[in-house]
Amino acid sequence: MKLLVTGGAGFIGSNFIYYEMEKHPEDALVCLDKLTYAGNLATLEPAMEDPKFRFVQGDIADGQFVEALFREEKPDIVVNFAAESHVDRSIEDPGIFLRTNVMGVQILMDACRAHGVSRFHQVSTDEVYGDLPLDQPDLFFTEETPVRASSPYSASKAAADLLVQAYHRTYGFPATITRCSNNYGPYHFPEKLIPLMITRALADQSLPVYGKGENVRDWLYVRDHCSAIDLVIRNGRPGELYNVGGHNERTNLQVVKTVLRELGKGEERITFVADRPGHDRRYAIDPAKIERELGWIPETPFEEGIRETVQWYLAHETWWKTILSGEYRNYFKRMYEDKGRGSL
Ligand code: NAD
Ligand code: TDX
């Protein structure tokens, strides 16, 4: 079988590529990624050694390019991770979020239909449900919770989900969707809360916490998200939506303090800064459906996952330091053009 993984040079997509290589070494993998600021080819360096892996640089929102790639590669399954993913950036500049996260999905789905792809999987987010109040801990997002997005990012992801569901209903398009809670783990871009705190704490810089740090997120180790997607693409029912989460709710302040404890650093650099506009208060996923129907179980407790994540950042300083310095953006040129491999 051949899988096309879009957005595989980013955080979750790259973890998914490594998960699939380990779990299904018989499958071929093609990664399509535009290499925006969030994509890092160095992340995929070990994958490049595998003859069953191919990297292609390109834009999911470029119809002609996508059509040519599908004609050439004829994938059996398409898993779409490609997205603009940072809420704060969507507040600054929503346009690119609509182009990639909505139009890109339409273009991918049309190519899937034209080329008889047997499964399209859309990687979505719990943020499409909006937020929950802080004072009702018994409330959770289920698959029946109405969509009610708060940020341009979550609105673009919600729009894509509606489009995927409409394609299933109208064309019988064989699609599935997962809506996962906040992920953490290796290769997480250091603009997001946990890697931002790790890398800034290591540099003895201030640690900016929005508002009072009371907002709650439901954290899942990235490998557990990958195992959920793997189950859904192979055993999930077309047309179905699955929530993914591990019942790991923490306030942002708790998360930051846990990271600092793991690093052996004090809390004196925590700085409370202006809140994010429209800041969602609490996310909390009810994963009963995927557990019941597909037997998915999250394996990594939060304390263990944080320990592994902190260890990973300590052991991979070059990875994040080249990102912070901007040097990673030259990687492509160095590895391909300068070595006479041409531009991909
Ligand atoms: P990321 O920002 O780390 O990676 C996104 C990747 O997509 C990058 O490699 C980028 O270069 C690529 N990309 C962006 N625009 C593209 C385009 N037009 N064409 C091709 N490639 C493009 O994001 P992530 O955190 O790995 O998230 C992956 C997916 O999972 C997203 O769809 C996101 O909405 C969803 N998600 C993320 C989380 C989370 O906690 N990070 C939780 C739930 C769902
Ligand atoms: O500097 C910061 N200080 C801070 O207090 C940053 C970057 C974040 N925060 C807060 C905002 C959030 O309440 O921490 C929480 C987590 O923030 P992010 O890491 O930006 O993640 P979030 O907004 O929750 O969205 C993430 O999870 C859902 C991903 O980025 C999305 O792609 C995914 O869909």
Image: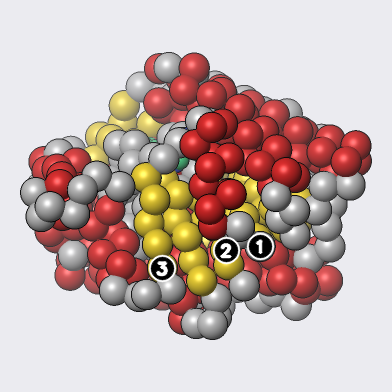
Q: Which residue type carries mark 2?
A: Leu
Q: Say what amino acid the circle numbered 3 marks.
A: Phe
Choose top left, top right, bottom left or bottom right for residue 158.
top right
Would you place residue 227 above or below residue 205 in this image? Answer: below
Query: Which residue appears at 49% of the width and 17% of the height?
Result: 95
Tell whether circle 3 marks a residue whose Cβ is less than 8 angstroms from ligand 1.
no
Quick one: 44 or 284, which is closer to the camera?
A: 44
Q: Residue at x 40, y 26 (%)?
A: 89
Amino acid type indicated by mark 1: Asp
Q: Is the residue marked by circle 2 packed among few (<14), some (14-19), or many (20+) residues within 10 Å? A: many
Closer to the camera in the image, 338 or 285: 338
Q: Earlier in the sequence, mark 1 or mark 2?
A: 2
Task: Say whether residue 48 is left or right of residue 266.
Answer: right
Query: What is the distance, in whole Å, between disc 1 and disc 2 at their CAs?
Result: 6 Å
Q: Which residue is mark 1?
A: 76
Residue 181 - label: none
Q: Nearer the viewer, residue 211 or 110?
A: 110
Residue 19 location, x and y as percent? 48, 73
- Distance, label 2 to label 3, CA atoms, is 10 Å
Residue 58 position, x and y percent, is 41, 40
Q: Which residue is mark 3?
A: 53
Q: Can you tell me whether the CB of the residue at mark 2 lies under 8 Å from the nearest atom of ligand 1?
A: no
Measured as percent of width and height from the top left, residue 117 is found at 71, 55
Q: Quadrant of residue 294?
A: bottom right
Q: Is residue 326 left or right of residue 110?
A: left
Distance of mark 1 from mark 3, alpha carbons?
15 Å
Q: Are marks 2 and 3 in contact (CB under 8 Å)?
A: no
Kindly identify which numbered label has been placed on residue 3. 2
Whether pointer 1 and pointer 2 mark residues with C-beta atoms closer than 8 Å, the reply is yes
